[in-house]
Image: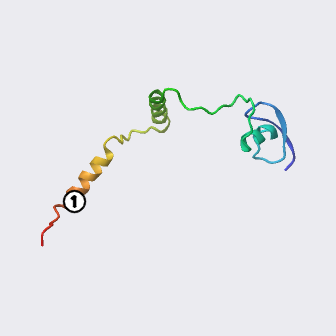
Amino acid sequence: MKPTSRECYICGKTFIAYHGSKRMCPECSEVILHHKRRNIPHLYDNPKDREAYEKDLKRRMTERHKDTIIADGYADRQMARTLERVGKVRTTL
């Protein structure tokens, strides 16, 4: 493949990519892949309000995948259904 000029998706700097799958410049690649510290605008952080995050995530996934399955109580329903099928087990000889 011919070398192409690309823009790093992390820092925005232009670099020469020698492979088709390269999306990061060598500096950012070194920082991320080798765990070196550097001030980069792309930070990984946990959500501050977990309940609000999960509520928003559920809303986004429902919109995206048209998901209408409700999993609340699923395990209890499955156990009850299995016990109905099996019936009573005799414990005496």
**In this view of the protein, which residue sits in the foreground, 18 or 39?**
39
Up-down relation of residue 25 to residue 51 (above or below): below
Secondary structure of the residue carrying numbered label 1: helix
> Residue drawn at (87%, 45%), measured in percent from left and top?
3
12 to the left or right of 83: right
How many numbered discs? 1
50 to the left or right of 14: left
Q: Position of residue 63 (x, y in %)?
A: 47, 33
> Residue drawn at (81%, 31%), measured in percent from left and top?
13
> Residue drawn at (60%, 32%), measured in percent from left and top?
45
Q: In the rendered image, which quarter is residue 62 located in?
A: top left
Look at the image and name its color scheme: rainbow
**Residue at image mark 1:** 85
Up-down relation of residue 13 to residue 23 (above or below): above
Q: Position of residue 17 (x, y in %)?
A: 83, 43
Residue at the outermost bottom position: 93
Q: Position of residue 53 (x, y in %)?
A: 49, 29
Amino acid type indicated by mark 1 = Arg
Q: Give the quadrant of the C terminus.
A: bottom left
33 to the left or right of 13: left
> Residue drawn at (78%, 47%), measured in percent from left and top?
20
Q: Position of residue 23 (x, y in %)?
A: 75, 40
